[in-house]
Image (spheres, helix red, strand yellow):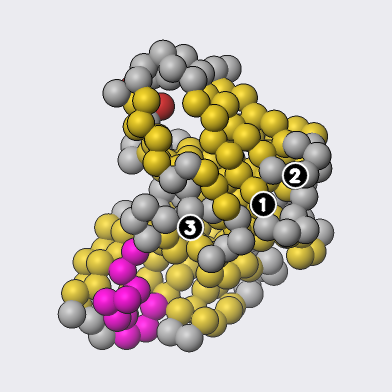
């Protein structure tokens, strides 16, 4: 059983569409991070959310941390082919010295 | 470029062999984390070092070991390799932003293929 459940696992959409990726857990996280990974490369940090209910925006990407700090979502507006990649959520629990627990990831494909 | 370097980029070896993967963290970062990424398991935390000391252990096999040296670079040693050890191995280093908030920066990874 994954501590962090991401959904959907796969998402194939057309350019210009909106999408939301969800990251859910029954555990509380002290912080949660979203990463984007391209094939054969390391994950790249997009955002860190810390406070319950926090919303952060990064251009067309909006990240939200749940009020209870157990879940998060990533919303992309007007997706572009350059958004294609693997999106990973990862959380830090309590005093785990930054050890990240990753979700399984969402593979996003945006078709021109 | 995250500032974390890993060598080698690719490694092909035979079952039963031993390999060493190397990682240099970003300048100033004291923590190093090792992760394994495979298609069926996703990204799995292996082990963390902080300023030369082991700090946390995850799903690391007994055949695997790691260390962090005084200059803060780290090495992951994989021995008695099996076909199932074929995976991408990532190193990350972190900076502590706030209490309990650590942002990790990943290296480009080492792709290990065991034949």
Q: Earlier in the sequence, mark 1 or mark 2?
A: 1
- What residue is drawn where x is 63% and y is 73%? A53
Instruction: Give the secondary structure at mark 3.
Output: loop
Count neighbours of disc 2 (C-alpha within 10 A) and say few if under 14, some if 14 to 19, many if 20 or more. Answer: many
Nearer the observer, disc 1 or disc 3?
1
Tell me, yes or no, whether the highlighted magenta stretch contains residue A82.
Answer: yes
- Describe residue A27's horizontal placement relative to residue B16 as left or right: right
| Tag 1 near tag 2, CB within 8 Å | yes
Instruction: Give the secondary structure at mark 1.
Output: loop
Instruction: Give the secondary structure at mark 2.
Output: loop
Q: Is residue A75 above or below residue B8?
A: below
Kindly identify which numbered label has been placed on residue B72: 2
The span shown in magenta is A76-85
Q: Where, quadrant-wise, is the N terminus of chain A in this rendering?
A: top left
Distance from label 1 to label 2 (Cα)?
A: 7 Å
Nearer the observer, disc 2 or disc 3?
2
Kindly identify which residue carries mark 1.
B25
């Amino acid at each position: 059983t994954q501590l962090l459940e991401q959904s959907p696992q796969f998402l194939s959409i057309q350019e210009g569409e909106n999408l939301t990726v969800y990251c859910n857990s029954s555990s509380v996280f002290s912080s949660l991070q979203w990463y984007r990974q391209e094939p054969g490369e390391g994950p790249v940090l997009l955002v860190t959310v810390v406070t319950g209910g926090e919303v952060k925006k990064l251009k067309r990407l909006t990240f939200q941390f749940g009020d209870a700090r157990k879940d998060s979502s990533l919303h992309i507006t007007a997706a572009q082919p350059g958004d294609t990649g693997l999106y990973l959520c990862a959380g830090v629990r309590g005093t785990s010295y930054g050890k990240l627990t990753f979700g399984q990831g969402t593979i996003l494909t945006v078709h021109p | 470029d995250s500032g974390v370097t890993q060598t080698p980029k690719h490694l092909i070896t035979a079952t039963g062999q031993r390999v060493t993967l190397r990682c240099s963290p970003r300048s100033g970062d004291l923590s190093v984390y090792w992760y394994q990424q495979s298609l069926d398991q996703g990204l799995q935390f292996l082990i963390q070092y902080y300023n030369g000391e082991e700090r946390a252990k995850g799903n690391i096999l007994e055949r695997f070991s790691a260390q962090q040296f005084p200059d803060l670079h780290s090495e992951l040693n994989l021995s008695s390799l099996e076909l199932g050890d074929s995976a991408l191995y990532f190193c990350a280093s972190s900076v502590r932003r706030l209490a309990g908030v650590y942002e990790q920066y990943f290296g480009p990874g080492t792709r290990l293929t065991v034949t």
